[in-house]
Image (tube, rainbow, N blue to C red):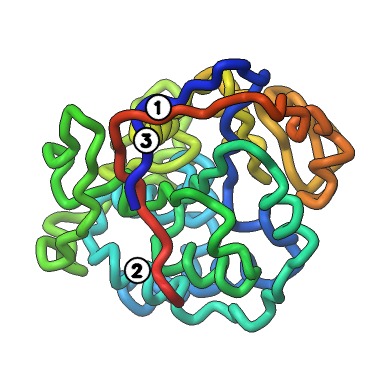
Amino acid sequence: MEYDDRFQQTQRSKYDCLLFDLDDTLYPLNSGLAIGCRNNIEDYMVQKLGIEKSKISDLGNILYKNYGTTMAGLGAIGYHFDYDDYHSFVHGRLPYEKLKPDPVLRSLLLSLPLRKVIFTNGDKVHAAKVLSKLGLEDCFEGIICFETLNPTNRKNVSSDNEVDSVFDASAQTTTTDSKPFDIVGHFAQPNSGSQQLPKTPILCKPSEDAFEQALRIANIDPQRTIFFDDSVRNIQSGKRVGLHTVLVGTSQRTKGADFALESIHNIREALPELWEVDEKSEIRYSGKIAIETSVTA
């Protein structure tokens, strides 16, 4: 799917784009998918990477805390694995049947007279399945997902913002060339905070680089965009790159969040101005960019 490169309104509202996280944002945390995902990640670490089960809990917590996702952390400390295989194992076995169509959210999204884009750390197949189960597959103009930010070769990202998002799984293995970095032992040492950790080859939230890349790809002006996410870390990173931010899943506003919503269903009550777009406004488009689009689940 192709999108226009420059977005102009003759009479501009305060915002022109809404950027949405997917998991635990467009559906509630208690759906059961988050627990299933965590269990699948732990099983992958044991079954595919040969990590001792007794070490999984501490290792997983440290990787998630320091790299944003366990997957990014595993890549950083020296595990080489097929990203598609990882996503298939972790997301492919999730209880998607627990997600039900959400006609209320669908109506809200379709009534919003603004651009709407998904920004998720998940892979495109997972994103498509979630949106399909929720009945929201046609509510967004595009999806920025794992493949969008992690193409086979970063050099494939061209100057006109087009992204080659076909991932070359054949270039990876599930073995390690050397002993992985002992990150658990690292943090057990005195003054560990002063030592630099290995960098991850994976670009994902909450990295500010991931946000900046996503904004560039989708030609999004952060100053005119509201970002919705259930993660405080993601919200704070979004704020640092200039986005207006909404923390979803709690009514308690934290540092970095401009608004806080108990549920995504509360958008209209909290942000009525999103619907206050001058009916005489004219939208003009020119140029094109490419964003990952959902595939039929």
Q: Foreground residue, 58 or 96?
A: 96
Tell me residue 10's x, y (percent): 56, 16
Q: Which residue position holds label 1?
A: 212
Mark 1 vs mark 2, CA separation in Å: 25 Å
Mark 1 vs mark 3, CA separation in Å: 18 Å
Q: Is residue 19 left or right of residue 47?
A: right
Q: Which residue position holds label 2?
A: 86
Amino acid type at image mark 3: Asp
Q: In what element is the residue under mark 1?
A: helix
Q: Foreground residue, 280 or 269?
A: 280
**Contact (CB < 8 A) between labels 1 and 3?**
no
Q: Quadrant of the C terminus?
A: bottom left
Q: Foreground residue, 109 or 238?
A: 109
Foreground tag (1 vs 3): 3
**Contact (CB < 8 A) between labels 2 and 3?**
no
Disc 1 or 2, which lies upstream in sequence?
2
Which mark is drawn over residue 56? none
Q: In what element is the residue under mark 3?
A: strand
Label 3 packing within 10 angstroms: few (<14), some (14-19), many (20+): some
* Relative height, residue 221 to residue 39 (above, below): above
* Relative height, residue 297 to residue 149 (above, below): below
Disc 2 or 3, which lies upstream in sequence?
3
Q: Which residue position holds label 3?
A: 4
Tell me residue 263's x, y (percent): 81, 50
Res. 209 image quadrant:
top left
